[in-house]
């Protein structure tokens, strides 16, 4: 699998150090609040697990299955809610986790749904944010790394269901796409 990687963009050690910083910020902002963490499947799973183990707060952890890539290397522009129901967020603070902020449509659609269901506040946290113009969600409240407009895999991010388990974020070789 590693032979398919053109370049390691962010190595495992750098990711783990950045998670320490993100966790501290989350702890500062959510201390004393009833918190529900909503992670977007499947990409945010590794990010969620590693980040939340560092946050010593009582929290409810939920996952929501949404999709916007649909198997390709670019966002389709359409957000599909694959789950029929949302967690109970009424009157609660929500930390919304995703692997990558690309067009912003996914986070925007999920934030709107959570607010419609009565969330007191919704803050967003992403491992990666592409440095591109967005017409929706401008920036996440917490961002691990800003990257260029390239298709990346690893640490939860996949291409056709593969490469999620890599401990780093990397760029695929053209021959693997």
Image: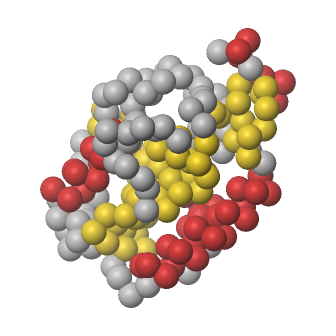
Looking at the figure, which quarter contains the C terminus? top right
| Place of residue 122 in the rendered image (x, y in percent of width and height, measured from the top left) | 31, 64
Above or below, 92 relative to 86: below
Which residue is found at the position 28% from the left and 58% from the top?
87
The front one of 176 and 74 is 74
Most distant residue in the top direction: 175
Q: Is residue 34 left or right of residue 52?
A: left
Query: Residue 164: which quarter of the image?
Result: top right
Which residue is found at the position 59% from the left and 57% from the top?
144
Q: Is residue 85 visible?
A: yes
Above or below, 96 relative to 84: below
The front one of 160 and 104 is 104
| Place of residue 39 in the rendered image (x, y in percent of width and height, measured from the top left) | 44, 54
Above or below, 172 relative to 21: above
Q: Is residue 164 left or right of residue 52?
A: right
Most distant residue in the bottom direction: 32
Which residue is found at the position 28% from the left and 53% from the top?
111
| Place of residue 33 in the rendered image (x, y in percent of width and height, measured from the top left) | 35, 82
């Amino acid at each position: 699998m590693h032979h398919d990687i053109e370049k390691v963009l962010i190595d495992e050690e750098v990711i783990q150090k950045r998670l320490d910083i993100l966790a501290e910020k989350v702890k500062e902002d959510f201390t004393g609040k009833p918190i529900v963490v909503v992670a977007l499947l499947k990409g945010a799973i590794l990010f969620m697990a590693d980040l939340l183990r560092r946050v010593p707060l009582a929290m409810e952890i939920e996952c929501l299955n949404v999709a916007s890539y649909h198997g390709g290397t670019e966002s389709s522009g359409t957000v599909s809610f694959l789950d029929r129901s949302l967690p109970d967020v009424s009157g609660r603070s929500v930390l919304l986790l995703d692997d990558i902020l690309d067009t912003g449509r996914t986070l925007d659609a999920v934030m709107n749904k959570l607010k419609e269901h009565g969330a007191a506040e919704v803050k967003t946290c992403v491992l990666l944010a592409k440095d591109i113009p967005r017409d929706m969600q401008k920036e996440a409240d917490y961002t691990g790394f800003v990257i260029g407009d390239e298709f990346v895999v690893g640490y939860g991010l996949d291409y056709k269901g593969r490469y999620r388990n890599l401990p780093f974020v990397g760029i695929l070789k053209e021959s693997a796409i």
